[in-house]
């Protein structure tokens, strides 16, 4: 099957990493995911005035912040003076060891250690009660609320990447396109923003960090999302079973989401 060209989704920003539209992909019924409604990014602490004007212009009604309380306290999001979107967030921690906070042993970080660290993140995420709660709330908000939405975590690549991939699956997007959308993070023109926000904290924790380790920790690999898919499929038989049994996305909700978000 010949796949259509992928959308060009990145929005130009000064202080927000990886802000993009994750709509525009073909669905299995011949429709497409609507553009201009589904956005994803990293955190907004360093958003410039121009960034805030841009976000405000997107008419986002709901923000789903996958970060935990400590991340939100350390990196509070800047807001436009007229900001009026509802923010959904978890009352507690959503991860015990985000890559940007160091973690693991205080030893030199090799490429393989970085890769294994990220594989462990994606292995834990399907059974993380906080993320189960947040993904469930994400799908409920898309089902029950009108207008555009924005999902984000710290870097906008792991928790956010999984959230986007699950929704695209619900909407009937082919897995190859789901992976391609996930991998677009590596093409973000704002990698310097993430490095500025993350690298000093990581360097203060570890010893030497190999360049490939930085790429493994700050970027994504196909095996990351593949690990999440494999864990879910092994434990539940299919991603659809997991969505229905664990995240509350039954056939009725799936149909409503497809009606709302496909064109």
Image (spheres, rainbow, N blue to C red):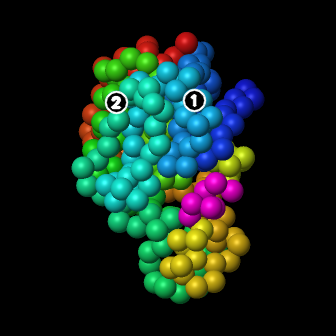
How many residues crowd mark 2 within 10 Å: few (<14), some (14–19), many (20+)? few
Q: Which residues are magenta?
A: 192-198
Q: Nearer the viewer, residue 58 or 32?
A: 58
Residue picked out by circle 1: 53
Residue 221 in the image, given as x and y percentages of width and height: 62, 57
**88 to the left or right of 83:** left
Residue 14 in the image, given as x and y percentages of width and height: 66, 44
Residue 19's mark? none
- Residue located 56% across and 23% down the image: 57
Note whether residue 132 is visible: no
Determine whether 67 is above or below 52 in the image.
Answer: below
User: Quarter of the image containing the N terminus?
Assistant: top right
Residue 47 in the image, given as x and y percentages of width and height: 56, 44
**171 to the left or right of 127:** right
Q: CA distance from mark 2 to mark 1?
A: 17 Å
SS class of the residue under badge 1?
helix
Residue 120 in the image, given as x and y percentages of width and height: 45, 66
- Residue located 63% across and 61% down the image: 195
How many residues crowd mark 1 within 10 Å: few (<14), some (14–19), many (20+)? some
Name the front one of labels 2 and 1: 1
Q: Nearer the viewer, residue 22 or 54?
A: 54
Determine whether 11 is above or below 101 in the image.
Answer: above
196 part of magenta stretch: yes
Note whether residue 224 is visible: yes
Marks 2 & 1, CB-CB < 8 Å contact: no
User: Quarter of the image containing the C terminus?
Assistant: top right
SS class of the residue under badge 2?
strand
Most frequent secondary structure within the magenta stretch: helix
84 part of magenta stretch: no
Residue picked out by circle 2: 86
């Amino acid at each position: 099957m010949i796949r259509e060209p992928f959308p060009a989704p990145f929005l130009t920003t000064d202080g927000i990493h990886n802000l993009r539209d994750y709509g525009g992909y073909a669905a299995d019924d011949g429709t497409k995911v609507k553009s201009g409604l589904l956005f994803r990014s990293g955190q907004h602490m360093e958003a410039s005035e121009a960034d805030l004007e841009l976000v405000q212009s997107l008419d986002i009604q709901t923000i789903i912040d996958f970060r935990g309380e400590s991340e939100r306290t350390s990196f509070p999001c800047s807001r436009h003076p007229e900001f009026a979107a509802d923010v959904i967030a978890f009352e507690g921690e959503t991860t015990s060891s985000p890559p940007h906070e160091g973690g693991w042993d205080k030893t030199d970080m090799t490429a393989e250690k970085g890769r294994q660290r990220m594989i462990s993140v994606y292995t834990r995420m399907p059974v993380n009660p906080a993320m189960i709660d947040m993904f469930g709330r994400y799908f409920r908000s898309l089902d029950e609320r009108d207008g555009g939405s924005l999902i984000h975590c710290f870097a906008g690549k792991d928790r956010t990447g999984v959230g986007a991939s699950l929704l695209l699956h619900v909407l009937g997007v082919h897995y190859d396109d789901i992976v391609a959308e996930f991998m677009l993070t590596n093409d973000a023109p704002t990698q310097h923003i993430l490095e500025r926000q993350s690298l000093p904290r990581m360097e203060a924790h570890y010893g030497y960090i190999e360049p490939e380790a930085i790429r493994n920790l700050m970027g994504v690999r196909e095996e990351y999302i593949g690990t999440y898919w494999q864990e879910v499929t092994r434990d539940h038989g299919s991603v659809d079973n997991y969505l229905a049994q664990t995240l509350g996305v039954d056939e009725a909700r799936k149909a409503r989401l497809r009606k709302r978000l496909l064109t």
